């Protein structure tokens, strides 16, 4: 009960002196209904008590799936509980980047990406998350109906394009083209760009080869007709 009371006290803006995210207490970035389910859950009470940036990292490394809420009772997944705890802690940027760069722990990386989408500025969201679109590792995901398989790059793409992920409403992210027009982002070069260029060149060469073959075939046919005459 003490831990639950402590969580609710952190949600009270009266007397809150920590840093703000878009003008509000970071812990309030999740809807009240979701926050209530989290603070009333067994995992929150037993596994999130007194976590700090270091021990939360250890707990996140133990995750085996991502998810928001599941089951008929809409119980919060451990991933969502740790995301909420991370919002309460609101670590320094360097710590979040260390989470993100921990390549051996894909669920810790997914958790950091989720936090970044909730808290970073639009241009920083794109700068920081787009490189993860090249991470194709499998993730297990728990939904209301059961478990499914997704991929880290697909999860990041959802963070960049959807308005709701893991039972959480995401603030509206400006499109990349808008930020490019405002000169806040440079035009993105696809990591597959060189391969696509080579493929286009190969297809072009094949087309030229077919055209040459057709011309030669036509000439040989014409020459055959002349000889016959």
Image (spheres, rainbow, N blue to C red):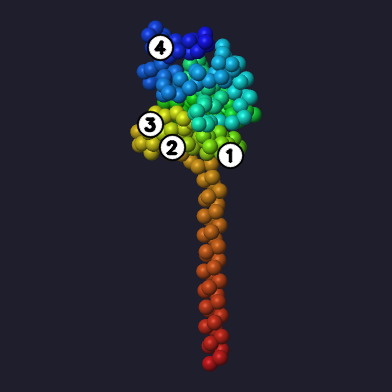
Residue 149 got which mark? 1
Foreground: 62 or 173?
62
| SS for dot 4 | loop
Q: Please name which of the two marks, 4 or 2, marks the residue nearer to the observer.
A: 4
Q: Please name which of the two marks, 1 or 2, marks the residue nearer to the observer.
A: 1
Residue 179 visible in this rendered orientation of the protein: no
Residue that label 4 marks: 12
| SS for dot 1 | strand
Q: Position of residue 197 (x, y in %)?
A: 52, 50
Q: Is the residue 227 above or below the residue 3 in the image?
A: below
**What residue sits 38% from the left and 12% below the top?**
13
Whole-Å distance between the Cαs marked 1 and 2? 19 Å
When asked about the image quadrant of residue 163, the answer is top left
| SS for dot 2 | helix
**What residue sits 44% from the left and 10% below the top?**
9
Q: Residues within 10 Å of mark 2 (few under 14, many from 20)?
A: some
């Amino acid at each position: 009960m003490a831990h639950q009371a402590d969580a609710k006290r952190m949600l009270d803006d009266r007397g809150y002196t920590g840093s703000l995210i878009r003008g509000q207490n970071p812990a309030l970035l999740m809807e009240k209904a979701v926050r209530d389910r989290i603070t009333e859950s067994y995992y929150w009470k037993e596994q999130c008590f007194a976590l700090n940036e270091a021990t939360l990292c250890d707990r996140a490394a133990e995750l085996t799936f991502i998810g928001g809420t599941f089951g008929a009772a809409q119980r919060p997944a451990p991933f969502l509980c740790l995301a909420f705890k991370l919002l309460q802690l609101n670590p320094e940027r360097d710590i979040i980047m260390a989470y993100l760069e921990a390549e051996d722990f894909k669920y810790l990386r997914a958790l950091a990406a989720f936090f970044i989408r909730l808290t970073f500025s639009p241009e920083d969201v794109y700068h920081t998350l787009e490189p993860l679109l090249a991470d194709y590792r499998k993730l297990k995901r728990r939904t209301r109906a059961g478990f499914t398989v997704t991929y880290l790059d697909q999860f990041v793409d959802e963070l960049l394009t959807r308005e709701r992920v893991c039972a959480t409403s995401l603030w509206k992210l400006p499109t990349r083209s808008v930020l490019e027009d405002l000169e806040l982002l440079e035009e993105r070069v696809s990591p597959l760009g060189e391969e696509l260029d080579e493929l286009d060149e190969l297809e072009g060469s094949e087309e030229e080869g077919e055209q040459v073959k057709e011309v030669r075939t036509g000439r040989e046919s014409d020459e055959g007709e002349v000889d016959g005459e």
